[in-house]
Image (cartoon, rainbow, N blue to C red):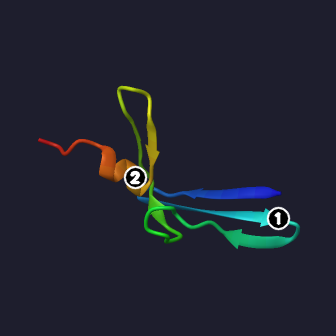
Amino acid sequence: MWLDIDFGTYNSSKSLLLDGTLKRIAEPLKHGYCFPSSIFITAQGQIFMGHAAENARPNPL
């Protein structure tokens, strides 16, 4: 089993090679195969990634 993650500047994607079969992994919120290269960690220690991070972070002033 191999996990491939393409960390891009603005967007990332991932896929899994399992028993010789390549499977693209969809982003859970928008179900696309490309997601923002964002991580947000709250003061309570919750970790958000992708679209969830973009939605969870505070808006800039």
**Residue at image location 33% in from the left, 52% down from the top:** 54
Bin the neighbour count of mark 2 within 10 Å (Cα to Cα): few under 14, some 14-19, many 20 and up. Answer: some
Query: Image check: 44 left or right of 4?
Result: left
**Residue at image location 29% in from the left, 43% down from the top:** 57
**Residue at image location 71% in from the left, 71% down from the top:** 23
Mark closer to the chain start, 1 or 2 = 1
Badge 2 amino acid: Ala
- Foreground residue among 34 and 7: 34
Q: Which residue is mark 2?
A: 52
Question: What is the x, y in percent for residue 17?
Answer: 78, 65
Badge 1 amino acid: Leu
Residue 24 vertical placement versus 58 (above, below): below
Q: What secondary structure is marked by label 2?
A: helix
**Residue at image location 44% in from the left, 34% down from the top:** 46
Q: Which residue is mark 1?
A: 18
How many numbered discs, if any? 2
**Quadrant of the image occupied by residue 18:** bottom right
Q: What secondary structure is marked by label 1?
A: strand
Residue 39 vertical placement versus 9 (above, below): above
